[in-house]
């Protein structure tokens, strides 16, 4: 079920890209609400503009995601969240050599997790449908470290679907997205749940290999019956 929710959330994220109304040349990362709306607009504008290239080679969607979307996703923080208690386990290692090896594995995980996200989002962009998205109201955020940007997916004849984008303020003061929640279900929590057993039983090296393999699959949307 978690995989199905994960896939649906990502499909709806494409709808967000498609219907954002803000036309911006430069993203305002100092405002979490404007950042989400502007990134949505610019990413979809490029997808629309380069449809001829995409139709010939879907792998081009990776380029668009890397250049337009990835700079505004805090994939490092997201990766740490997915690893969960494993991070603390590494911190408690006393052997310098063992700790150095474990830290290197974490760096490798972050890199393959980033590539995995790029591949996943690129695949979802192949499933664009003309849904409408309404953004929630902007709230004061000056004293906040994490903000939830609320959106609502509206499609005729179907119930509205609520999606929340969780964004956090980095040390540089810029806001970046790190999680999506659809009807209260966190995508990061879903991925952590999926990988937790594998990480515990087979180790981080196996998880790295698994994500690396998935990230290198041809760009495609696997749908509800596939693996997000």
Image (cartoon, rainbow, N blue to C red):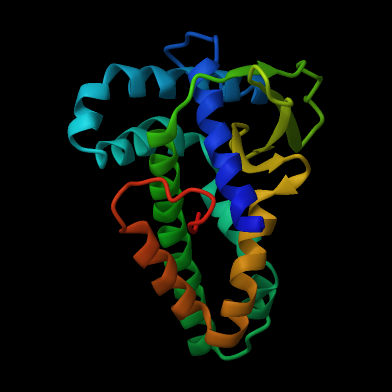
Nearer to me, 34 or 21: 21
Q: Is residue 38 left or right of residue 155?
A: left
In the figure, residue 61 lies in which quadrant?
top left
Nearer to me, 205 or 26: 205
Nearer to me, 123 or 27: 123
Q: Residue furthest bottom?
A: 95
Please say if 211 is above or below 204: above
Place of residue 72 in the rendered image (x, y in percent of width and height, measured from the top left) = 51, 34
Q: Is residue 79 left or right of residue 24?
A: right
Residue displayed at 55% across by 9% down: 21
Residue 10 seen: yes
Residue displayed at 47% across by 11% down: 24
Please say if 3 is above or below 183: below
Place of residue 216 in the rendered image (x, y in percent of width and height, measured from the top left) = 31, 58
Q: How many marks?
A: 0
Place of residue 173 in the rendered image (x, y in percent of width and height, measured from the top left) = 63, 32
Q: Name the image quarter holding the N terminus.
A: bottom right
């Amino acid at each position: 079920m978690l995989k199905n929710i994960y896939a649906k959330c990502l499909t709806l994220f494409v709808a967000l890209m498609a219907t954002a109304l803000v036309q911006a040349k430069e993203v305002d990362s100092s405002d979490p609400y404007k950042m989400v709306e502007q990134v949505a607009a610019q990413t979809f504008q490029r997808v629309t503009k380069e449809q001829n290239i995409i139709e010939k080679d879907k792998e081009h969607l990776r380029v668009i995601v890397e250049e337009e979307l990835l700079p505004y996703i805090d994939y490092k923080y997201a990766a740490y969240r997915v690893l969960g208690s494993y991070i603390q386990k590494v911190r408690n290692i006393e052997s310098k050599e063992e700790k150095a090896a474990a830290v290197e594995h974490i760096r490798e995980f972050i890199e393959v997790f980033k590539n995995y996200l790029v591949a996943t989002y690129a695949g979802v962009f192949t499933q664009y449908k003309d849904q409408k998205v309404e953004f929630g109201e902007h709230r004061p955020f000056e004293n906040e470290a994490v903000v939830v940007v609320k959106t609502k997916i509206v499609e005729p004849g179907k119930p509205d679907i609520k999606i929340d984008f969780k964004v956090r303020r980095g040390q540089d003061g810029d806001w970046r997205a790190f999680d999506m929640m659809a009807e209260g279900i966190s995508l990061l929590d879903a991925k952590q749940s999926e990988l937790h057993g594998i990480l515990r039983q087979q180790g981080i090296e196996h998880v790295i290999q698994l994500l690396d393999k998935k990230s290198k699959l041809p760009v495609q949307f696997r749908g509800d019956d596939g693996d997000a």
